[in-house]
Image (cartoon, rainbow, N blue to C red):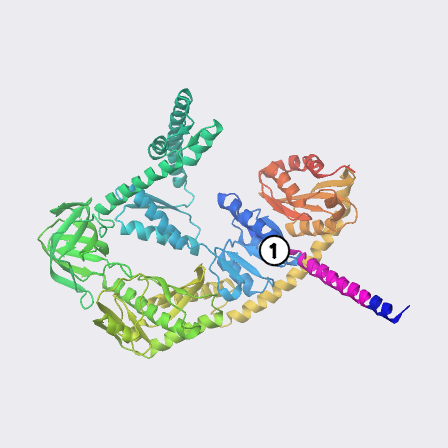
């Protein structure tokens, strides 16, 4: 062979080798991409409508990210200890990450402190410190509550009572939602009736009556829609008019989606565009009516007050002894007198009451004469500068032209001022620690707390939070004077004053300066020295939107109350552990933890022995279905831990086996289903099987294909449920 041909064969071989390497690398990459990432999602309840959307999102993400997601429902709703136990078990069984909707945040935080969970943890709707979890995905419940209340006011106004039903279970999410709803409704002058469930059945009775009324309304709507559809067919038409659809919705409360669904079944469409236009017109009318009734009286067409704007004296005064009543409104109408027991809106020529704005709540207090008392619940103001004192006559009568004493709740104002001043220090501290990109994105300042929203691209670390907290407290201890002055806006900007979220500024602005640390535009009320804040403590840091974080904090007496609660908790713990004081509490807790771990190991050993002893007997009644051994057993008095041990043994068997084991302890019972790998190859799925078996008793549960648990509903139906296993298993198993 010629030398030239030899070189050609060498080059050809190198090309082939290069192509092989490329292809093999590509295969390796693809193989790496196809690695399955097991993730367990543990939920308290899957019965509400939001669960379906949640699951769709999880399933979609699982496909995109190549994750093996197990959706797990607690078989006893509201059981925090069961949830924590299940988290540990999923970690033990190979889960690489957990997604959890906490039953009880405090219990979960304790479990995290004990490091029982060592894998990435994502929480849903929780407020645990960011350093303890990988991420938190939460709903802005405060905004949700506000939006819900605004929608209700726009549609129905403030002349009807609003019934608010709250669960007795306490959580941060519920608190924020409640605050959001009530702040808007109270600001709108609404009558609020709150109910909290305590097991007396009162809420159920109210709801049942409402459901009966609604059912009657729906029946009327069905009858009306049937008549409309019959008439359309007789006329040869195929569209329900927007007017008819609106009448069904507005008059009969018949949902538009239901109208469209029923019409579609008969080949008829609905004029949705015209319906939407009519809905918007109705909302505008409702909104205008509401505005005219003083709920949002600063809007166009609001209260008509023929008098100069109210003079605000509250920056320097807590009371006005010679203020005059220039207007009284009742149900949106100007009146001369407010009688005892009547809600009303009172307008004064001058007032010390701060009107809600810039995130600071309005003042409360009283407007009095020698013979009467008007209790002010909150204060707002019109676009024209008239201060509206919203409340009710609690004694005597008040008349237009009366000279009154207007006095704020000074203690509430003082607490609010401390929290508002803290918001200024907090923003400056955040910019120092995180960077100049931090800007206020919203705030709520009340007498109980300071809520501050700010722009930031990531959750704060524990160290960052502590640095911010330390900086604010440092400025408090420095006793820096807080100076306010009115300046032309151009001059204020030269000072470096920062504008606050949601505020509108004129040519002359009010500037609040805290030494050389903070300079801001602000029309709120503040402490005159940082020392008056006492102490500052951050309660939580969380996400409210993409690129927006939220800090909630307390000052002064709020910190003392917080410390008192911590002290009470420690004292209760010490008492429970039979300690005379809290001095040795930490050491005693550590000792108990070690002791419990030793007992857990002992219990684990005993459970294994019990499991081994019972394992041989449960296969005596095994049946063979399509080549798979199907066994069920009732093991009364056996703990859930022992059941799981037995299930673990069964799922590791080399022969095809499906087993459902039941145990009843008192009024509670548990089911465990285990499927060996050969059984799973034939179609068995433990999570789905145990779900079906538990349903016979009215229970619920689920889990992975190899192992799953469920709670027993009616314990007297356990035998019936176990007897149903053969038929249920046969539905899953494939013929050989």
Q: Relative to residue 207, is residue 728 drawn left or right? A: right
Q: Main secondary structure of the magenta part?
A: helix
Q: Identify the residue position indicated by label 1 in the image.
A: 65
Q: Can you see residue 666?
A: no
In the image shown, does 548 or 552 lie closer to the viewer? 548
Does 412 sit above or below residue 250?
below
Residue at 40% x, 24% y is 232
Residue at 29% x, 64% y is 416
Q: Is residue 38 magenta?
A: yes
Residue 381 drawn at (x, y percent): 21, 56
Does 269 sit above or below residue 566?
above
The image quadrant that residue 27 belongs to is bottom right
The image quadrant that residue 342 belongs to is top left
Which residue is most to the right? 1
In the image shown, does 425 or 76 lie closer to the viewer? 425
Q: Relative to residue 696, is residue 125 drawn left or right? A: left
Q: Residues within 10 Å of mark 1 (few under 14, many from 20)?
A: some
Q: Can you see residue 119?
A: yes
Residue at 52% x, 70% y is 586
Secondary structure under tag 1 reads: helix
Residue 191 drawn at (x, y percent): 27, 45
The magenta stretch is: 11-39
Q: Relative to residue 261, is residue 371 drawn left or right? A: left
């Amino acid at each position: 062979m010629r030398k030239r041909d030899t070189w050609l064969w060498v080059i050809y071989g190198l090309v082939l080798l290069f192509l092989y390497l490329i292809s093999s690398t590509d295969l390796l990459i693809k193989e790496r991409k196809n690695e399955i990432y097991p993730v367990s999602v543990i939920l308290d309840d899957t019965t509400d409508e939001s669960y379906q959307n949640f699951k769709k999102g999880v399933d979609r993400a699982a496909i995109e990210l190549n994750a093996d997601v197990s959706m797990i429902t607690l078989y006893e709703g509201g059981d925090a200890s069961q949830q924590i136990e299940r988290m540990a078990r999923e970690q033990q069984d190979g889960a690489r990450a957990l997604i959890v909707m906490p039953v009880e945040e405090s219990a979960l935080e304790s479990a995290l402190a004990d490091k029982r969970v060592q894998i990435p943890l994502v929480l849903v709707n929780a407020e645990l410190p960011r350093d303890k979890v990988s991420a938190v995905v939460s709903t802005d419940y405060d905004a949700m509550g506000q939006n819900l209340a605004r929608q209700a006011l726009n549609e129905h106004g403030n002349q009807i009572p609003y019934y608010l039903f709250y669960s007795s279970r306490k959580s941060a999410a519920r608190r924020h939602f409640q605050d959001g709803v009530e702040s808007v409704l109270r600001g709108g002058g609404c009558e609020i009736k709150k109910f909290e469930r305590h097991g007396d059945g009162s809420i159920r009775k109210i709801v049942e009556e409402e459901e009966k009324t609604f059912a009657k309304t729906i029946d009327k709507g069905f009858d009306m829609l049937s008549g409309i559809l019959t008439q359309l067919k007789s006329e040869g038409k195929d569209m329900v008019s927007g007017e008819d659809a609106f009448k069904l919705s507005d008059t009969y409360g018949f949902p538009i989606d239901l109208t469209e669904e029923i019409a579609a079944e008969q080949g008829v469409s609905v004029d949705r565009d015209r319906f939407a236009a009519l809905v918007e017109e109705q909302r505008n009318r409702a909104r205008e009516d509401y505005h005219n009734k003083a709920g949002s009286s600063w809007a166009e067409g609001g209260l008509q007050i023929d008098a100069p704007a109210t003079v605000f004296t509250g920056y320097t005064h807590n009371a006005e002894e010679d203020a005059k009543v220039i207007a009284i409104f009742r149900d949106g109408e100007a009146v001369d007198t407010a009688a005892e027991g009547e809600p009303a809106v009172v307008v004064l020529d001058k007032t010390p009451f701060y009107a809600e704005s810039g995130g600071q709540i309005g003042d409360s207090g009283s407007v009095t004469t020698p013979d009467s008392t008007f209790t002010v619940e909150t204060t707002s103001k019109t676009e024209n500068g008239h201060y509206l004192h919203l409340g009710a006559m609690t004694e005597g009568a008040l008349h237009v032209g009366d000279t009154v004493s207007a006095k704020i709740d000074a203690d509430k104002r003082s607490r609010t001022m401390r929290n508002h001043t803290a918001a200024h220090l907090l923003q400056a501290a955040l910019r120092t620690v995180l960077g100049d990109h931090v800007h206020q994105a919203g705030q709520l300042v009340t007498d109980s707390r300071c809520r501050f929203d700010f722009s930031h691209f990531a959750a704060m670390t524990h160290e960052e939070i502590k640095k911010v907290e330390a900086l604010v407290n440092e400025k408090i201890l420095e006793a820096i004077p807080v100076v306010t002055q009115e300046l032309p806006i151009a001059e204020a900007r030269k000072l470096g004053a920062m504008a606050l979220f949601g505020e509108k500024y004129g040519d002359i602005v009010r500037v609040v300066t805290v030494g050389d640390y903070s300079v801001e535009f602000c029309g709120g009320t503040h402490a005159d020295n940082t020392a008056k804040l006492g102490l500052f403590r951050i309660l939580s840091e969380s996400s409210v939107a993409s690129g927006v974080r939220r800090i909630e904090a307390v000052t002064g007496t709020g910190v003392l109350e917080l410390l008192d609660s911590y002290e009470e908790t420690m004292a209760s713990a010490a008492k429970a552990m039979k300690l005379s004081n809290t001095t040795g509490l930490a050491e005693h807790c550590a000792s108990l933890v070690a002791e419990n771990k030793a007992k857990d190991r002992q219990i684990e050993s005993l459970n294994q022995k019990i499991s081994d002893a019972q394992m041989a007997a449960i296969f005596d009644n095994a049946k063979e279905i399509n080549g798979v051994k199907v066994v069920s057993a009732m093991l009364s008095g056996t703990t859930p831990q022992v059941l799981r041990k037995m299930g673990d043994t069964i799922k590791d068997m080399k022969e095809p086996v499906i087993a459902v084991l039941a145990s009843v302890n008192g009024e509670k019972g548990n089911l465990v289903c285990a499927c060996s790998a050969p059984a799973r190859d034939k179609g068995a799925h433990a999570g789905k099987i145990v779900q079906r078996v538990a349903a016979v008793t009215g229970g619920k549960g689920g889990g992975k294909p190899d192992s799953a648990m469920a709670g027993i509903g009616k314990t007297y139906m356990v035998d019936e449920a176990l007897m149903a296993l053969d038929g249920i298993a046969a539905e899953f198993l494939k013929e050989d």
